[in-house]
Amino acid sequence: MTTEKIGALRSLMQDKGFDAYIVPPTDPHQSEYIADHWKTREWLSGFTGSAGTVVITQDFAGLWTDSRYFIQAEKELEGSGIGLVKLTVPHAPEYIDWLGENLHEGQIVGIDGKVFAQSLVEMLKKQLAPKGIKFNCAFDLPGQIWQDRPPLSPNEVIEHDLKYAGKSRTEKIALVRHEMENASLDYHLVTSLDDIAWLFNLRGSDVDYNPVFTSYAIVSQNSAVLFIDQRKLAPSLKEKLEDEGLEIKPYDEIAQYLTSLPRDSSLSLNSVKTSHHIYLGIPPHCIRVNDISIPAKLKACKDETEIKHIRNALVKDGVALVKFFRWLEENVEKGEITEITLDEKLTEFRQQQPGYMGNSFGTIAGYKDHGAIIHYSATPESAYTLKPEGLLLLDSGGQYVDGTTDITRTICLGKPTDEQILDYTLVLKGLIKLSMAYFPEGTKGFHLDALARFPLWQHGKNYGHGTGHGVGYFLNVHEGPQGVTPNPAVSYPLREGMLQSNEPGFYSEGKYGIRLENLIVVIPHIETQYGKFLQFETLTLFPMEINLIDLDLLTPEEKGWLNRYHKKVFQNLSPRLSPEDNQWLLEKTREVKY
């Protein structure tokens, strides 16, 4: 029971003299999706959303999360003794303000420095230390009462074949060293699991949906060191890596290695992705350079080989989706399909595609009012049975050896209402406006975010999540450093080769949710006396729901985009479909009239 866990935690807090304890949703690598071993906040609170921080005092327990999870959190926290505190700004650490208002001088906040980012610790201290509030970062108190905590995964690592990766490990390490030389860096600490997987052309299965493995890496001009549980490397792979010049050291030796860095050497790291514990291991005589990791910058811009394979992955995904949605339409009247069995059937169709390696995230199948829960996850207790009526929002994706996919479509299983048609059309118009954007090189995502929201804004409507996130290449479905969001803190410029999502939405609580999502890649547009201009190319291949569109609200330009897109969908998917599937797709991609 959550209440018993909180009681046990409060007892430990009292023993240590802690007046408050913070439990974040992270692991030592600041991953979004984390291995079961690190799901401390979920174990303690029962809340399963990816974003949310718990603060415990002797007389208060609260979870801070953003609007994506308000409905979900209220349900999952019911009866737990933990209250929901709604963030006013997504991703903001507003619990720090609460601590500042409710703690007194001399009181102590406890955190586990192994899972807290150095940047966040610095923020805590900057805001709370002037008020005389102290910190102890040395104790994982929940870990002391978590009796059946899952161990770290021993799963073996696999190679990402060079024909898909495009560049060898040696070439990628050379690119990192070139960037280090330009920045006068002696060492580069890589802590993000997806950066390490990309750099060494390796993939793992330590985290659900993300093909990564628990590890650290340090690159210098003379060495490249991978810190990993060596049980995860088959002898043949370990030998191959070492023959290529990599040093393999145990995962838990990273801190010791850092202490041995030479005097006055410069070390680059990302304090947002580096734990406080690891940061403390860096000798004071080292020059610390805080920046986004070099592999993160490099892998964000897909090269020609990667984009070629991503296109193929999206064709395979489109084929699976055609087969699935046709099956759904033909079987929904039987009353046997639930939000869970729907997900299972979609996975079955994806599994039929060559190179399928699993789903890229937990499928969001939100029927009727569940669609308004932005990150809804069906359970046997909550799952609705589908009927030939109402809206279904389906957000899903696949991992393939040649790409990562992420697509959302909203369909109507019966006769739509005028309200549903209006809202769907406004969301579609926003997606089209962003799809058709032209922008000068150096433009950042927050400069473009309003394009996708403007049609909704005109009707006094909005949505509480970002419009687009970067997408990995057979890696994390959410990948930085770029994104399209109202938050100017996400300020990395959009560059040629960047793959990301385009996903405006609208959510009517208690009624339905609508979201449409395509993957888009940044490509050149034109170069003029005013500089180089870029544009987006849409790569996702699956039709929109024409029966949900008020065509009178689309401009001729928007209708032209829709017709061209549907023509592209049919041309790319039809050669891989049966005659029956092709007939279904032909109707779904029919031309709309001007």
Image (cartoon, grey):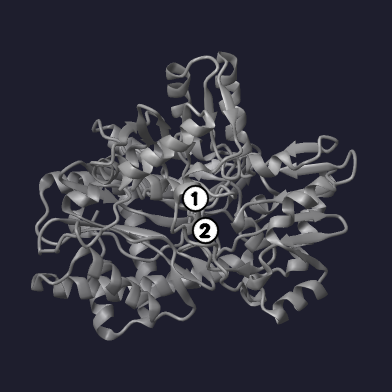
Dot 1 or dot 2: first in sequence order is: 1
Q: Nearer the viewer, residue 576 or 349?
A: 349
**Would residue 545 appear left or right of 55 to someone viewing this image?**
left
- The answer to whether residue 550 shows anywhere in this view is no
**Would residue 326 appear left or right of 569 to someone viewing this image?**
left
Residue 110 sits above or below residue 589 on the image: above
**Would residue 130 appear left or right of 351 to someone viewing this image?**
right
Disc 1 residue type (three-letter): Glu
Q: Nearer the viewer, mark 1 or mark 2?
A: 1
Residue 307 appears at what percent x and percent y? 57, 65
User: Residue 476 shows which numbered tag?
Assistant: 2
Residue 181 appears at what percent x and percent y? 85, 48
Which image quadrant is residue 570 in? bottom left
Q: CA distance from mark 1 to mark 2?
A: 9 Å
Q: Are marks 1 and 2 in contact (CB under 8 Å)?
A: yes
For mark 2, give the secondary structure.
loop
Which image quadrant is residue 458 in? top left
Residue at the spot of label 1: 32
Disc 2 residue type (three-letter): Asn
Residue drawn at 35 percent across, 67 percent down: 567
Residue drawn at 25 percent across, 30 percent down: 460
